[in-house]
Amino acid sequence: MSLSGLGDTGKAQPPPALFPAPESDTPTPVRRRGGAPQNGPAQGDDAGRQLVFFGADAAEPTVADLAGLLAGPGEVVRMGGTARLSVQVDAAWRVHVLVAELASRGLAASWQPTEGERHAVRTSYTRVLKPLAAAWLHGTAKRPPAAFHLTGRRLRLWLAAAGSPEPPDCFLLRLGADDQECWEPIGVALAAAGLAGTLLGPGEGGPAYRITGRRRLARLAELVGGPPPATPPQAWPT
């Protein structure tokens, strides 16, 4: 499949029209100025300030970063010795960003319009995604691995797929509606990253984690890096 996307008919489709113009499982050690390499997430009150060293720009993109999509509404399925990753998004700009992110990791992607003016972005079946599927699937159920943690690149992908601002000082990171077993451990991973959030159930506008407060939003902005070019104003934490 090409990066422009193929529909069920097999004919090439252009990417959906945009709005009117206006990392691996183990973080790469980063040497702090004047100190020794730091190999794990910081603990205590300094966690938020030090975790920026593991932000989206701290390492090269890897396939393991795609765990960020699975922390949100992304799905992975297996077929033989291969696997495919897919995620439904609610805006055309998200399609453009995700296709580019997948391409940067050597994965061709396609997209299709779905019901409710949504779009499904998906990879081809590939052996490259087999380890990700093995880590996250228990039978057919999605569940984070025991050592799951959130890096800047993982958060960036989650935000690109399913993050949205909630003025004045909140940001929502949406979850998979049928992934109840994931919600609690994902919240633990957010808290460990210095982004403790409030879990909103389906009846409260979720499922999603609400990240509240200027300090946490500033931390989120540091971790995910600057907005991708296709992102509309106000859709990315700054």
Image (cartoon, helix red, strand yellow):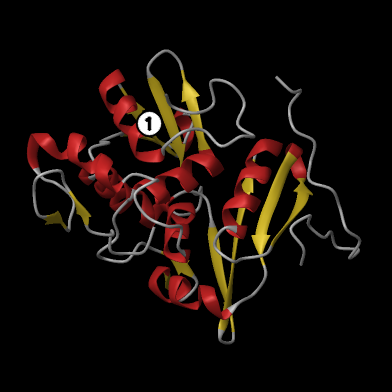
Query: In terms of depth relative to the viewer, which is nearer, 178 or 34?
Result: 34
- Which image quarter is the C terminus in? top left
Which residue in the structure is indicated by mark 1?
221
Query: In terms of depth relative to the viewer, which is nearer, 124 or 31?
Result: 31
Q: Is residue 175 visible?
A: no
Check the image and report above or below for 2 versus 182: below
Q: Amino acid at mark 1?
A: Ala
Q: Is residue 21 visible?
A: yes
Q: Quadrant of residue 106?
A: bottom right
Check the image and report above or below for 192 versus 123: above
Check the image and report above or below for 13 versus 202: below
**Residue 47: percent from left, percent from top:** 16, 39
The answer to whether residue 157 is left or right of residue 198 is right
**Residue 180: percent from left, percent from top:** 41, 52
* Secondary structure beneath label 1: helix
**Residue 162: percent from left, percent from top:** 53, 40
Q: Quadrant of residue 147?
A: bottom left
Query: In terms of depth relative to the viewer, which is nearer, 211 or 28?
Result: 28
In the image, what residue occupies the spot 73% across and 27% down? 19
The answer to whether residue 99 is left or right of residue 31 is right
